[in-house]
Image (cartoon, rainbow, N blue to C red):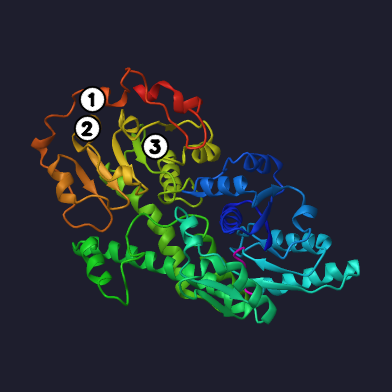
């Protein structure tokens, strides 16, 4: 089929590249000319495992192309996806301005009957507004071909989006038009071969399903964080509680890992948007408000623990921070807990030495070369000169650190573990104090175990030639500036 996707962002790129992988002829449109030129060269502007390879395959096979011209995207197309952003307004509601603008552009340039698929996450009723906008535009041109507007929400996890698209657990399509149903079945046939994953429903139910799914997952996270805070008060271990309740198949193990709060582009925004939708209809969604408030408070818990440990005396202290992205396998720092932690430390007069495998560029784009922030090329380099270690993201590379090195290098051997990566008894036995989320058995190490502290382990921060370990970006060579500075070899 001939497919166009409006929007070369996260959802649009994954959708376009994966559809092209199966042989559909796909054009992907973006108004950012530089981004389009970058993609034409096969350079992916975002970090998502496997995506750059899929884009390269589409370019090689001539099934995927990129354009900045709306006329080209609307020419002789069977299905056209709208995959543009829906940012939060001041009241938390989703701004559908970009979606409706895309609908207007489609109506102005479409040259034949087609299906318009709204892939963006939009409030209930948006597809109806898109249909009206398209009908008005076509009517204004005096054309009379049929255009059907369909809801097709995405269910992609950052860090696993390509696999989620290629092997979906469900494909939800909101339409009651028989011809549109058949065309959408043809479009998704390559992803629907083993058993029928497609679920058809009315448009508004499909729109609400997306918000309900994200709100449910966010609720599970906020629930376990609430229980973790109670566990600390009653001297219980949330990890044992999590295993106990997760064994119940009605609850399951997914999304009940306690930590320092959820972030990203979806959960925080979508919970607020669903809450705004309810309030707009004079219904007060108490549970959704609680989910959001618990998460906002949870992001402060790690900072509170740091304040308590150091009796509020943070001015002049230096903290190593491992993990900037809101979750592993992405460079996305939108609503990331690390941002709350860093900004609170800066307000208290402390500074941060941070490392993340992928989010260094994103961090510098947000904060620039600000005082109190050093971005280091390795996790070991971030430790050098730090008073304590804070962990905000559960990257696999953080799961088995050299605890002896941490004891010897940190000025105050203590880990504030916002993701509960370690067994408290193991960490304290190594000579470190351990502060996790909802853990019993966390606390202080035996003082005698710290007698080794103070030896020099700088050699672990050097490569075989004795030079500094450079920060290698996944999409470019060594990044200049503070990543290439002397701190890497300090």
Q: Residue 337 or 50: which is nearer the viewer?
A: 50
Residue 199 falls in which quadrant of the image? bottom right
Q: Is residue 236 left or right of residue 159?
A: left
Relative image position of residue 450 (x, y in whole percent): 13, 34
Q: How many marks?
A: 3
Q: Is residue 477 left or right of residue 113?
A: left
Q: Is residue 147 left or right of residue 240?
A: right
Mark 2 residue element: helix
Q: Residue 424 or 198: which is nearer the viewer?
A: 198
Say which label, 3 or 1, has the lower sequence index. Answer: 3
Say which label, 3 or 2, has the lower sequence index. Answer: 3
Tell whether label 1 touches label 2 (CB within 8 Å). Answer: yes
Mark 3 residue element: strand
Say which label, 2 or 1, has the lower sequence index. Answer: 2
Image quadrant for the C terminus?
Answer: top left
Label 2 packing within 10 angstroms: few (<14), some (14-19), many (20+): some
Examine the rendered structure and indicate whether residue 136 appears above or below residue 260.
below
Examine the rendered structure and indicate whether residue 353 appears above or below residue 253.
above
- Residue 186 falls inside the magenta stretch: no
Q: Which mark is residue 355?
A: 3
What separation in Å lies between label 2 and label 1 (alpha carbons)? 7 Å
Residue 96 falls in which quadrant of the image? bottom right
Q: Bounds of the magenta span?
A: 120-124
What separation in Å lies between label 3 and label 2 (alpha carbons)? 17 Å
Secondary structure of the magenta portion, mostly?
loop
- Residue 123 falls inside the magenta stretch: yes
Work out which residue is located at the far right of the displayed protein and give it: 142
Q: Which residue is mark 2?
A: 405
Image quadrant for the N terminus?
Answer: bottom right
Relative image position of residue 265 (x, y in whole percent): 52, 56
What separation in Å lies between label 3 and label 1 (alpha carbons)? 18 Å
Q: Which residue is mark 1?
A: 457
């Amino acid at each position: 089929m001939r497919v166009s996707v409006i929007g070369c962002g996260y959802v649009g790129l994954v959708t376009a590249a994966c559809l092209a992988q199966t042989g559909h002829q796909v054009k992907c449109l973006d108004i950012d000319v530089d981004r389009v030129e970058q993609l034409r060269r096969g350079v992916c502007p975002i970090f998502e495992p496997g995506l750059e390879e899929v884009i390269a395959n589409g370019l090689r096979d001539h099934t995927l192309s990129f354009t900045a011209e709306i006329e080209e995207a609307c020419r002789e197309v069977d299905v056209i996806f709208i995959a543009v952003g829906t940012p939060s307004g001041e009241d938390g509601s989703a701004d559908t301005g970009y979606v409706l603008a895309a609908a207007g552009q489609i109506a102005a340039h479409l040259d034949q009957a087609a299906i318009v698929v709204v892939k963006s996450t939009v409030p209930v009723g948006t597809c109806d507004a898109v249909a009206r906008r398209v009908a008005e535009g076509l009517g204004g041109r005096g054309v009379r071909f049929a255009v059907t507007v369909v809801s097709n929400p995405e269910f992609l996890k950052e860090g696993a989006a390509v696999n989620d698209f290629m092997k979906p657990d469900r494909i939800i399509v909101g339409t009651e038009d028989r011809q549109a149903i058949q065309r959408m079945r043809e479009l998704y046939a390559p992803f629907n071969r083993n058993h029928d994953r497609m679920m058809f429903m009315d448009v508004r139910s499909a729109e609400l399903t997306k918000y309900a799914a994200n709100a449910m997952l966010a609720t599970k996270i906020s629930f376990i964080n609430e229980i973790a805070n109670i566990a600390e008060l009653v001297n219980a271990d949330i990890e044992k509680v999590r295993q106990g309740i997760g064994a119940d198949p009605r609850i399951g193990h997914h999304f009940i890992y306690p930590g320092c709060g959820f972030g990203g582009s979806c959960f925080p925004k979508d919970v607020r948007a669903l809450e705004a939708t309810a309030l707009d209809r004079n219904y007060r969604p108490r549970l959704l408000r609680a989910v959001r408030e618990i998460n906002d408070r949870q992001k402060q818990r790690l900072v509170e623990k740091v304040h308590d440990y150091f009796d509020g005396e943070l001015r002049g202290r230096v903290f190593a921070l491992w993990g900037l992205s809101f979750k592993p396998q992405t460079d996305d720092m939108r609503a990331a807990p690390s941002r709350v932690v860093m900004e609170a430390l800066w307000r208290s007069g402390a500074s941060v030495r941070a490392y993340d495998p992928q989010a260094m560029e994103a961090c510098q784009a947000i904060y620039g070369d600000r005082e109190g922030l050093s971005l280091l090329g390795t996790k070991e380099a971030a430790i050098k000169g730090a008073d304590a270690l804070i962990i905000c993201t559960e990257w696999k590379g953080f799961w088995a650190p050299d605890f002896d090195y941490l004891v010897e290098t940190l000025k105050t051997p203590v880990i504030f573990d916002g993701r509960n990566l370690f067994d408290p008894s193991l960490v304290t036995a190594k000579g470190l104090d351990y502060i996790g989320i909802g853990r019993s058995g966390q606390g202080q190490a035996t003082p005698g175990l710290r007698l080794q502290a103070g030896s020099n382990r700088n050699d672990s921060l050097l490569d075989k030639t004795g030079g500094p370990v450079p920060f290698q970006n996944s999409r470019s060579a060594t990044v200049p500036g503070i990543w290439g500075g002397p701190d890497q070899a300090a």
